[in-house]
Image (cartoon, coloured by chain):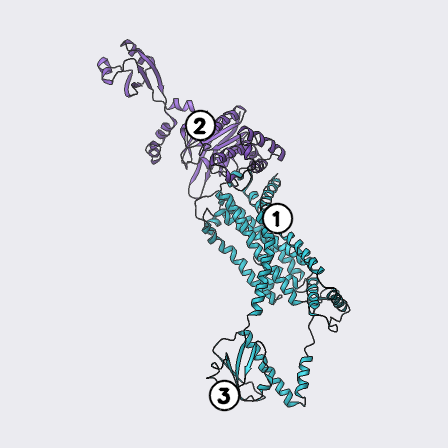
Amino acid sequence: MSNNKIWLITRREYLTRVRNRTFLLSTFLFPLVIILFIAGSVMIATQTHTHHKIAVVDANGYFKDYLRSDSSLSFDFSPGIDTLNYAERGNTAVLIIPALPEDNVTIYRLKFKKQLGPAAKDDLENRVNNAITDHLIYEKTSISRIQLDTLRSQSKIAALRTFDDNDKKARASNQNAAGAIGYVCAILIYMLTFIYGAMVMRGVMEEKTNRIAEVVVSSVKPFQLMMGKITGIGAVGLTQFLLWIVLLVGLSLLAQAFIPPSVGKEIMQLQQANAMGNAGNAIKVSEGASKIYEFKSAMSAANLGLTIFCFLFYFIGGYLFYSALFAAIGSAVNEDPQEAQSLMMPVTLPIVFSFFVATVALQDPTGPLAVWASIIPFSSPIVMTGRIPFGVPGTVPWWQLGLSMVSLVAGFLATVWLAGKIYRTGILMYGKKPTWKTMWKWAFHK
Amino acid sequence: MNILEVKDLRKTFATQIAVDQISFQLEKGSIFGLLGPNGAGKTTLIRMITGIFYPDAGEITFEGRPFDPMNDILRIGYMPEERGLYKKMKIGEQALYLAQLKGLSRSEALQRAKEWFVKFEMQSWWNKKVEDLSKGMGQKLQFVTTVMHEPRLIILDEPFSGLDPVNSNLIKDEIYSLARKGATIIFSTHRMEQVEEICDHIILMNRGQKILDGTVGGVKQQFKENLFRIGLERPLTEEDIKAAGASDAFAVVGRTDGQLVVKIAEGHRPNDVLSWFIQKGEGITSFVEILPSLNDIFIRLVEGTPLARQFQRL
């Protein structure tokens, strides 16, 4: 009987939303927004490095031959340049290199009018050190300048491929691709938690402000009403997710149909070469083919089945964990949306914080921060889904995954229980300005 | 047989006692008035009877058994004072949904909804949304959703607020008809004059306590002041009566519309008054007892409190 009522409420919540035109619209617009968001941030990251022209005052005389200019850094060795006039001559900074003894660390200086930024500074340091190495090799050996350059360009042929050695058969793993997939998963969970959490809160507020709540709770228990709403909106989320998977599979099939046959053949060659163990270093293929191959192998390395399963698990778990709290807030506030804003802080903060932790965890997926944040239920949905594409049980041992799942289940049972207590009182309480203190009282006193 | 018995019911909130030791019995098929000013504790009492609140102390017996909220609320229909509907939901769907929450199957709900929609001339609304309805139309729909599952106990909290006279009468007639069919009705209001008309039995609450319990007629008898209104062929003033030699059976206390209002003294009967006028040769055209209104009784009960002054202004 009671399950039947939750089912009726779930059904209503689900149908009223799915039948709505905005559901279809948002289902198709959301992936577009995500793609634009990621593409935008990649664009910004790659396009914004500016060109720096750096004047060099060199006491050794040989840097002129070894420091190479390119699109990001160029060097100005014109005579008579110094710390006073470098800016007038169009340079952003001046590099002062004193005479360098061979056996001592010596300080050289950079003066600037405009900050270089950490990336350009690292780049500059590398180039200066390489120049010194090149100079020493040239001086101490009988190698010719041409031979040295040839060696340098030849030595760039090795490419690192990493393998996950935890299964019986080592599987190719691609850290960059895993990181990218992890990032997308973390962003998705982060955004979906907010979107559906807010949907639950608005739904509860609607029932309270339209005075539907008392009519309904004379037929069902407040807890059933709350759970029905949470499961109904959760089902909307799952439907949306399912549609995205269909969309994704459809699009990738479509994309495959547009791959030219020659590229397809090259991808096949790469796959065969990889299967034989010589990971594609002998085969010369087009850049497009190797990109697609990398993407495909990253997808298979990420263990797509497990990744999708875990994504669903953490989506549902995280959704239940946070939407219950959002429901409690919705039940406490009156007509004024401002009240909701101030109450939401303690709930939104851990979500935002988890996302920051996730971006750090993706850089170091086995570090203590990553491990603990993916076990504690406040942050585990976002952080764990970010880590899983790196490989289970390679990066994420089974015990961590198990502990994290159990603690998430315990976590959402606790928040649902707590929210149920707050909701029961809040939904029929009008006119009182709510605070977390009063909500706490509702939960623990009678 | 009593459909509902409430014994020593008590509910306190953090700062106040909302319902304090309330007991009453409710006969099956009666129309029961739950009266009291705003804040008297009526809604809290109702919320306990409808299983929304758990009482802190006391017992509720429903149809002879201890009240079991999970099942018994399916046999109760409650229209709260704070009531509303889903604005974006179609009216027909909404009626079906609320009836199903009360345990009806979808097909039963559909059949009954159609009957009620025909009865209240609402068929054309089926596919409209609540936001397209006027307030009065919404109230009618709300009433229908309250009684659709044929509850044995119907609780209506201020059912006429926001209704025009035509729709008020429609609902009033429906209340009578439901009571005739055996449903018991609790009618909660702070408008005393509505209760006099409709209810058989009332209790009056103030500050969480029951201050009066009885039938409407009984209560009025209990609080009557032996006042009578006499219509005479020849209008008389107090002075005329004094001049004629006053009786110790009554005293004139006022005049309304040319009629005398008299108070019969302790130990005398109306006949003593009539015989005095007859002896004096005055022609009597009417003789009516004046009973106090429930509003007057309530004011007398809470006399001297700020609440009484508030009600005197009404």
- Numbered disc in front, either 2 or 1: 1
Which residue is drawn at the image coordinates 34% and 22% (left, top)? Answer: B225
Against A150, is A34 above or below? Answer: above
Of the chain colours in the picture, the one used for chain B is purple
Residue A9 occupies quadrant = top right
The amino acid beneath tag 1 is Ala
Residue B211 occupies quadrant = top left
The amino acid beneath tag 3 is Gly
Q: Which residue is mark 3?
A: A80
The amino acid beneath tag 2 is Ile
Q: Secondary structure at mark 2?
A: strand
Q: CA distance from mark 2 to mark 3?
A: 108 Å
Q: Secondary structure at mark 1?
A: helix
Q: Relative to residue A265, is residue B120 drawn left or right?
A: left
Q: CA distance from mark 3 to mark 1?
A: 73 Å
Q: Mark yes or no: residue A382 visible.
A: no
Query: Do callouts 3 and 1 mark residues in contact (Cβ within 8 Å)?
Result: no
Q: Secondary structure at mark 3?
A: loop
Q: Which residue is mark 2?
A: B202
Against A402, is B232 above or below? Answer: above
Of the chain colours in the picture, the one used for chain A is cyan
The chain holding disc 2 is B
- Numbered disc in front, either 2 or 3: 3
Q: Are marks 2 and 3 on the same chain?
A: no
The label on residue A235 is 1
Task: Tell me if mark 3 has few (under 14), some (14-19) or many (20+) residues whose alpha carbon lies within 10 angstroms of its own.
Answer: few
* Front-lying residue, A272 or A106: A272
What is the x, y in percent for residue B65?
56, 31
